Amino acid sequence: MKWSVVQLQNFRGREFEFDEVIDITDDLKQRNPEIRDLTPVHVTGKANVDSKKVSFHLHVTGTYTLPCSRTLEDVKVPIDVHSIETFLLQPLDYELGEMEIVHEADGGNINLIPVIEELLLLEVPLQVFSEEEINGATQVGNGWEVMTEEQFLNKQELAKKKIDPRLADLAKLLNENNE
């Protein structure tokens, strides 16, 4: 995923396609300890080369292994990132706008690995839940339970209607007197 500017100039005025699998697991795990594992990343795309810049249209796929936010179990999270990255081949003679982000060729070379690493680090979700946690989150515990508002109101209604067993005989006596 590294090209020299001279190599890229051979493609000036036309585009070329690339399709590579790279393993950057160790680098990403070092930069973000939440990442437990990463499959080799499949990078495909095309590059448009002109005299002053190269635009890479990237599609990056793979799978992270991250900890579940509740149980810390390993969870596989798919990666599917699309990005357009522009590298300048020559310094610009004008200022870039705030929203324009470009990279510069480093020592006559363009290396996509650091850019891909940044893209993948930005895509790491803040919270991940395993399928078991999503489908069957704990609903009852010792002295508590999770319920909807409707369930809560129904439970309160039943509690109002329920008579204390110690006072049940008194309630029968009152009902007899009312008749």
Image (cartoon, grey):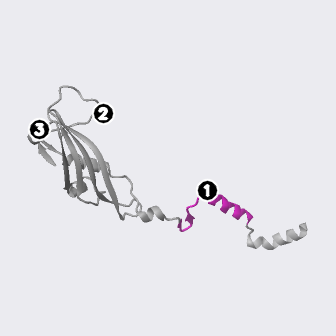
Of residues 126 and 106, the one nearer the viewer is 106
Q: Is 106 above or below relative to 121?
A: above
Q: Which quadrant of the figure contains the C terminus? A: bottom right
The tag earlier along the polypeptide, 3 or 2, is 3
Q: Secondary structure at mark 2?
A: loop
**Mark nearer the viewer, 3 or 2:** 3
Q: Residue at x 20, y 52 (%)?
A: 19
Left or right: 70, with 37 as reference point? right
Left or right: 100, with 73 as reference point? left
What is the C-alpha distance between the residues marked 3 and 2?
27 Å
Question: In x, y percent, where is residue 74?
Answer: 34, 64
Q: Which residue is mark 1?
A: 149
Question: Which portion, as a residue range, is magenta?
Answer: 140-161
Q: Secondary structure at mark 1?
A: helix
Q: Which residue is mark 2?
A: 99
Q: Secondary structure at mark 3?
A: helix
How many labels sit on residues?
3
Q: Which residue is mark 3?
A: 9
Q: Residue at x 63, y 57 (%)?
A: 150
Q: Crowding near pointer 2: few (<14 within 10 Å), some, many (20+)? A: few
**Mark nearer the viewer, 1 or 3:** 3
Examine the image and state in which quarter residue 70 appears. Answer: bottom left
The residue sitting at the left extreme is 6
Question: In x, y percent, where is residue 163?
Answer: 75, 68
The tag earlier along the polypeptide, 1 or 2, is 2
